[in-house]
Image (cartoon, rainbow, N blue to C red):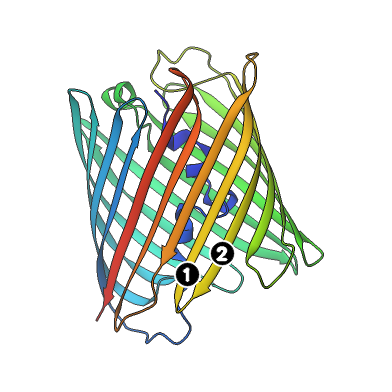
Amino acid sequence: MKNKKTSMYVVVPLLIGMSTSSLANALPDDQVQNERAAGTEFFFSDDSEGFQTRKLSAEFLPQYENADHYLGVRASAYQYKAEDWRRDGQKISFIGREIDSATANGWFVDAGIFTQDDHSLFTFDGSYRTALAKKTAIELFANRDWVETKPALDAGTNFTFVGAAVDQGLGEHVTVVGLAGSQFFSDDNRRDHGRIKVIYQPSLDLGLTLQARYRTYQSSKADVAGYYFNPHDYEEGMLAMGWRQRFAGWTTGLTAGFGRETINDDPSQGTRLFELNVQSPVHGSQFIRMNAGYNRSASYSGPDYNYRYIRGEWIISF
């Protein structure tokens, strides 16, 4: 019974490498800019405990320049399933993005109202990144959403996660990224998160990175009635390789990682992470982008919990 949205790999896209937010990387410089766009987005996930999430969205962007510069609205229909249990949800949100593709500085926001069963929640996902020096940048982030497990959704349990991340370049080939944040649950639980990642780029032309990652968190509340995965102490160390390449206008990215995690005082066990990102060139006035991932770690059911997802978006400008 592991809550996907409390995982640092999902909540904090800055630190993932090829993450969910990497879907919105800039389009080719020679694209024709338009004033409006519309599109659709989908998201499917399931895990080894039989919990499934389905999401289908429609987007309208009355102010649109490219994939990193737009304002609009998104309407989403959600469906959660676990054995004979099912829950539907609806969300309407304001979305916006203003990112410099060369530096990754700027902001994005997704703020709206999410209703499921008899519960309604103001949700928010956003960040602001700016340069402090030539090779130093800081990102402030906030995320508020439902805890996505059957008992947590039934109870209307939600969380708010806030924090900051700093990345520091060391020479031309090494970047160090550090993060600190706190996650406040509506059941009075609190998690304090810390993370560091060292990225080594052996060649500036290959699109290849070697990464050493470490993350940890501590929960203030031991008993959450089984609503979500909640160890008091959690640590994970991981070695990962990332590769990003552009071919015939297509942009692809791949990240693979293998690590070890320690939960409370239990013996350590292996973890795995795989992520794939693909974005098409612009064909006329439209493009698609997709990413998929697989994560293996522990949960209440034991050490072999795994989680899989796929997300896609199609946008046409006019």
At label 1, the amino acid type is Thr
In percent of width and height, residue 228 lies at 42, 23
Q: Is residue 126 visible?
A: yes
Which residue is at a point 43% across and 37% down the rendered structure image?
A: 5
Please state, as top left, top right, bottom left or bottom right, where the C terminus lies in the image.
bottom left
Residue occupied by mark 1: 251
Q: The residue tagged with tag 2: helix, strand or loop?
A: strand
- Between 251 and 61, the one lying in front of the other is 251
Query: How many numbered discs?
Result: 2
Q: Where, by quadrant of the figure, is residue 290 drawn?
A: bottom left
Residue occupied by mark 2: 244
Q: Is residue 117 visible?
A: no
Are the two marked residues, 2 and 1, in contact with CB atoms closer than 8 angstroms? Answer: yes
Mark pair 2, 1: CA separation: 7 Å
Please state, as top left, top right, bottom left or bottom right, where the N terminus lies in the image.
top left
- Between 170 and 69, the one lying in front of the other is 170
Q: Residues within 10 Å of mark 2 (few under 14, many from 20)?
A: some
